[in-house]
Image: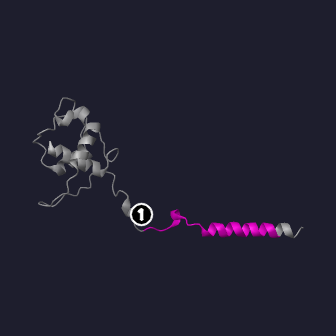
Amino acid sequence: MRTFVPSLAACAVAALLLAGCGKHNAAHEHNPNAAASGPISDSGDTGLRPKPGATVAMGDPQHGAAIFSQNCASCHGAQGAGGGIGPRLKAEKSRKNYQQAIAWIKNPQPPMPKLYPAPLSESDVNDVAAYVESL
């Protein structure tokens, strides 16, 4: 009986070691694309500007309208018509283009709240800018 207990313990340890070796642990696996999937900069403005004449993919103005009504209309009015603390955005001529709208949303001046990078994502910012440009 005395030789049976150490043999049983040795078998149990061996079984645990073998079970642990067979598990796939993704946390320790090297993934060369992992760093590329996260944000490169959280400053909002990279300083990069599109080349003159370059086309920029527009966001989705319908989705932008929904985001605008939740996050912007309380200050800029329904459909950007004004009436709150923020300026009227409908038919705004001082804003030069879509890229400038994106830059303003990402780097607002007080009293406008900073909503990027959270709660608004890069895609959300593009969508809101597309909506504002459609007003």
- Residue 77 percent location from the top left of the image: 20, 32
Circle 1 packing at 10 Å, graded few (<14), some (14-19), many (20+), is: few
Indicate the colouring scheme. Answer: one colour
Q: Which residue does the image show at 15% across and 45% down from the upper left?
A: 134
Eyeballing the image, is 126 above or below 52?
above
Q: Is residue 27 magenta?
A: yes
Q: Which residue does the image show at 22% across and 58% down from the upper left?
A: 48
Residue farthest to the left?
A: 93
* Residue at the spot of label 1: 34
Q: Nearer the viewer, residue 35 or 128?
A: 128
- Residue 124 percent location from the top left of the image: 28, 48
Residue farthest to the front?
A: 62
Determine which quarter of the picture holds residue 53.
bottom left
Q: Which residue does the image show at 85% across and 69% down from the upper left?
A: 4
Q: Is residue 29 magenta?
A: yes
- Total labels: the figure holds 1
Determine which quarter of the picture holds residue 68.
top left
Image quarter of the N terminus:
bottom right
Q: Which residues are magenta?
A: 7-31
Q: Secondary structure at mark 1?
A: helix
The amino acid marked with disc number 1 is Ala
Image quarter of the C terminus:
top left
Determine which quarter of the picture holds residue 114.
top left
Eyeballing the image, is 35 above or below 108?
below
Q: Nearer the viewer, residue 134 or 34?
A: 134
- Residue 66 percent location from the top left of the image: 26, 41
Left or right: residue 23 versus residue 66 is: right
Magenta stretch: dominant secondary structure: helix
Eyeballing the image, is 5 above or below 65?
below
